[in-house]
Image (spheres, rainbow, N blue to C red):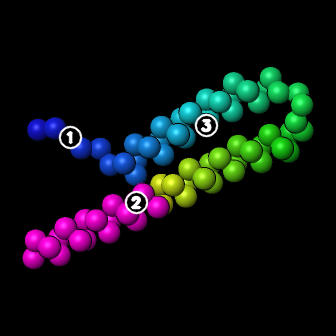
Amino acid sequence: MKRKYKKSILLPGALFIYATAMAVYFIPRNHEMSATEKWATVIASYVIIAALWWVLDKKEKMAQRREEESNS
């Protein structure tokens, strides 16, 4: 049986890994921005990823509710 991964987990998870890898790679090498700007950028990207997870999770739950109601 094929396992179906939820989009609300897979997409934000991939973006979280990508954002973390980019932060680890580029923050020490960037000398044009202050430390506060660097960390604000990283935190803002994590907030956006969390918002994406929340929206996708709500969307999946609504679709599941609609499917259950149509089957009843």
* Crowd around label 1: few <14 · some 14–19 · many ≥20 (10 Å): few
Relative to 22, residue 47 above or below: below
Check disc 3 and report its element: helix, strand or loop.
Answer: helix
Nearer-the-camera pick, 35 or 61:
61
Residue 57: image quadrant is: bottom left
Please count the marks in the image. 3
Q: Residue 57, which numbered label?
A: 2
Picture disc at residue 19: 3
Tag 1 residue: 3
Q: Quadrant of the N terminus?
A: top left
- Mark 1 vs mark 2, CA separation in Å: 18 Å
Q: CA distance from mark 3 to mark 1?
A: 26 Å
Q: Amino acid at mark 1?
A: Arg
Report the residue at 56% width, 50% height from top.
49
Amino acid type assigned to the residue bearing label 3 in the image: Ala
Q: Nearer the viewer, residue 28 or 15?
A: 15
The amino acid marked with disc number 2 is Asp
The image position of residue 43, as x and y in percent, is 70, 48
